[in-house]
Image (spheres, grey):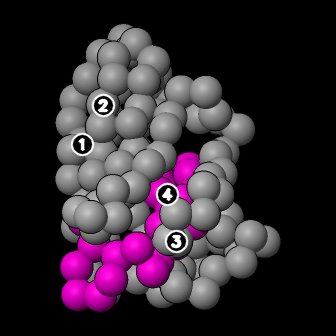
């Protein structure tokens, strides 16, 4: 499966932004998809995850809970990350990743995902 992330940009603190991750090549709905981000000089960190099919299982990092919403449209093979109330700490390169065999304990570890899209830059300024 191939992943294509898009939607990044330069926004002011307090603004909203929506990222998309389009899956192609296989049935997108059969993949669990995670969003990760990496700020300069920092390690890649988990942001959010939505399990495959329509299980309704969604998980967030504490730092984004209540501000970010992950969702998927299986008809379009696309996963979205809606971000609101952004602040400069959210500045990072955001990447989506997918895997078809993840279990709950593995979703926070980027090494457990087999497929990655290119990142999209999100920059938040005061």
Q: Which residues are magenta?
A: 22-51
* SS assignment at label 4: strand
The first of marks 3 and 2 along the sequence is 2
The numbered mark at residue 73 is none
Would you say residue 93 is visible in this rendering?
no
Give 110 or 125, whichever is nearer the viewer. Answer: 110
- Is the Cβ of the residue at disc 4 closer than 8 Å to that at disc 3? no
The first of marks 3 and 1 along the sequence is 1
Q: Name the residue rendered at 21%, 53% in the picture.
A: 6
Residue under label 2: 17
Cα–Cα gap, marks 3 and 2: 24 Å
Quadrant of residue 65 within the rendered picture: top right
Q: Residues within 10 Å of mark 4 (few under 14, many from 20)?
A: many
Q: Is residue 47 magenta?
A: yes
Q: Residues within 10 Å of mark 2 (few under 14, many from 20)?
A: some
Give 110 or 39, whichever is nearer the viewer. Answer: 110
* SS assignment at label 3: loop
Q: Nearer the viewer, mark 2 or mark 1?
A: 2
Q: Is residue 46 above or below residue 53?
A: above
Residue 62: image x %, image y %? 71, 38
Q: Name the residue rendered at 53%, 27% in the picture.
A: 67
Residue under label 4: 36
Residue under label 3: 52
Quadrant that contains the C terminus: top left
Residue 2: image x %, image y %? 26, 81
Q: Name the residue rendered at 40%, 45% in the picture.
A: 81
Residue under label 1: 8
- Is the Cβ of the residue at disc 2 closer than 8 Å to that at disc 1? yes
Cα–Cα gap, marks 2 and 1: 7 Å
Give 17 or 41, whichever is nearer the viewer. Answer: 17
């Amino acid at each position: 499966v191939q992943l294509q992330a898009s939607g990044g940009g330069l926004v002011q603190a307090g603004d909203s932004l929506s990222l998309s991750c389009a899956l192609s090549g296989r049935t997108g709905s059969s993949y669990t998809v995670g969003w990760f981000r990496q700020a300069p000089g920092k390690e890649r960190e988990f942001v959010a995850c939505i399990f495959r099919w329509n299980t309704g299982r969604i998980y967030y990092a504490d730092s984004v809970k209540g501000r970010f919403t992950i969702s998927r449209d299986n008809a379009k093979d696309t996963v979205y990350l809606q971000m609101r109330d952004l602040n400069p700490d959210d500045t990072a390169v955001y990447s989506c990743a997918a895997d078809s065999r993840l279990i709950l304990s593995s979703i926070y570890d980027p090494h457990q995902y087999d497929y990655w899209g290119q990142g999209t830059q999100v920059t938040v300024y005061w």
